[in-house]
Amino acid sequence: MAEKRLVQLTRPVPYLFQGPANDCGPFALAMVLGGFWPERFSPQHVMSLMRRLRVPMVGATLPWAISVAGSRCGLHVHTHWFGTLDEVKRWVERDCPVLVIVHPDDFRRCPWYALHYRVVVGFRDDADLPGGGELYFRCSAAPPCPGGEAPGNVTLSHADFQRQWRTWLTPNWYAAVWPAERRSPV
C-alpha cells in the first residue's frame, strides 16, 4: 500500500487579496513575509522594493525581483529553474514556503501568455488521489477559503500543478525562502 501523508508549513501564510491589479508577485512575497513577521511588511512596501524590477505599464514581476526584494526584507531566497515536484515538496518538508510561477488554467478566461505567482504551503501524497496527490497554495487572486483540512485557498493535483508549472517563460521556476536569522534548512 502506498504511503499517505499530509505535510504543511508550521507557520500559516496569511491570505492577502491582490484585487484586479497585476500584483501577484508582490502579494505572494508579502504573504510569505507575513508568515514570518506578521504586520511588518505590506504588499505596498514589497512593491516599492520591486519598483525597478517589474515590467512597466504591465506590472508583471520578474522572477529575480522575488530574490532581490526577499533579501532586502531579511529572507534567504533559493531560486531554481527547471525544478522538480520532489524538490518543492522537500522544501515544504523543511518548513520553507515555496513561491512558484504557473500558467493558471484553473482561472477563467486566462490568456495563453498569462503567468501567476502562488505560494506552496503544503501537500498530500496519496496514490488514491488523481495524479498521486495534491498541493496546497496561497493564491492572492483566488477567493479565501473557509476553514478545512487544506492549508491553502487553492488545491491542485500533482499532475495539474506540473502541467501549469511548465510555462513558456519560466519552466519549473521556484523560490524557497526562510528568514536570514534561521539556519539553512539544507
Image: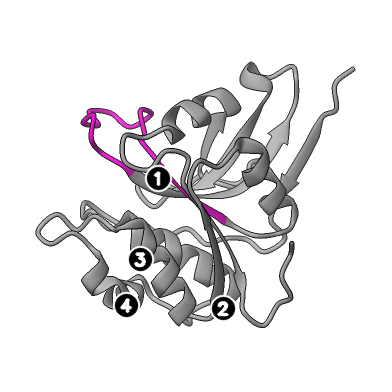
The answer to which of marks 1 and 2 sits earlier in the sequence is: 2
- Amino acid at the residue labelled 2: Trp
Magenta residues, start to end? 98-115
Q: Which mark is residue 143?
A: 1
Quadrant including the N terminus = top right
The location of residue 154, given as percent across then percent down, is: 50, 39
The answer to which of marks 2 and 4 sits earlier in the sequence is: 2
Q: Residue at x 35, y 66 (%)?
A: 65
Evaluate if marks 2 and 3 touch, with contact meaning CB atoms under 8 Å apart.
no
Q: CA distance from mark 1 to mark 2?
A: 23 Å
| Residue designated by label 4 | 49
The location of residue 51, given as percent across then percent down, is: 23, 73
Q: CA distance from mark 1 to mark 3?
A: 25 Å
Q: Secondary structure at mark 4?
A: helix
Which residue is at the front of the view, 110 or 98? 98
- Amino acid at the residue labelled 1: Pro
